[in-house]
């Protein structure tokens, strides 16, 4: 199972970015052998590119990172997202999932503004609202159980 964990990172508040550790732990506990791509893996790849290509400009480094990121999206079996915060990069990843007909589930914090374009483009996807950060683990486990059962 290849899972891509997505959502806003670069300009998102730390309280949002910190949620990815909950998603990551829950997924690893449920699918210990899953190949999981997280925002940290994407950023680690970018850091690796900086070290390997010290003469590259920032746009060149970002191009390498983007290629890596989008290849991981194309190769995943399912994308699990936290859509509570909007992001251009997240939007690009979602476009690739749509183009490649990947299964996607969207988690979002109650009160978040979810784009009409998102719900319209992913009409057959799951949208899971959580009230508190503590709800993520339980709700994600429910989704992963259904995924394992083929629901």
Image (spheres, rainbow, N blue to C red):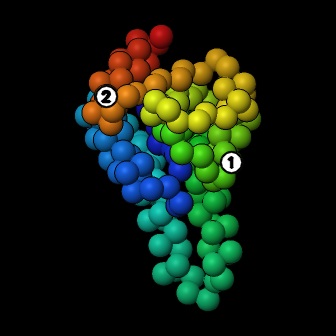
Pointer 2 local density, CA inside 10 Å: few below 14, some 14–19, many at least 20: few
Q: Which mark is residue 4?
A: none
Does 62 appear above or below 3? below
What secondary structure is marked by label 1?
helix
Residue 45 in the image: state x and y as whole percent.
49, 65
Q: Which residue is mark 2?
A: 135
Closer to the eye: label 1 or 2? 2
Q: Is residue 69 left or right of residue 38?
A: right
Q: Are marks 1 and 2 in contact (CB under 8 Å)?
A: no
Residue 74 in the image: state x and y as whole percent.
63, 42
Residue, x 72% and y 25% (percent of image)?
A: 120
Residue 31 makes an appearance in the image: no
Q: Which mark is residue 92?
A: 1
Pointer 1 local density, CA inside 10 Å: few below 14, some 14–19, many at least 20: few
Residue, x 67% and y 20% (percent of image)?
A: 123
Residue 124 in the image: state x and y as whole percent.
64, 17
Q: Earlier in the sequence, mark 1 or mark 2?
A: 1
């Amino acid at each position: 199972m290849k899972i891509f964990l997505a959502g806003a990172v670069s300009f998102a508040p730390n309280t949002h970015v910190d949620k990815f550790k909950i998603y990551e732990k829950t997924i690893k506990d449920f699918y210990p052998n899953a190949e999981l791509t997280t925002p940290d893996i994407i950023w680690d790849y970018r850091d690796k590119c900086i070290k390997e290509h010290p003469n590259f400009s920032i746009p060149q480094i970002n191009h390498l990172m983007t290629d890596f990121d989008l290849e991981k999206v194309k190769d995943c079996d399912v994308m699990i997202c936290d859509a509570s915060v909007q992001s251009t990069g997240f939007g690009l990843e979602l476009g690739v999932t749509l183009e490649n007909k990947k299964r996607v589930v969207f988690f979002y914090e109650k009160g978040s503004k979810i784009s009409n374009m998102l719900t319209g483009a992913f009409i057959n996807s799951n949208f899971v609202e959580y009230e508190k950060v503590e709800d993520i683990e339980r709700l994600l486990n429910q989704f992963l159980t259904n995924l394992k059962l083929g629901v």
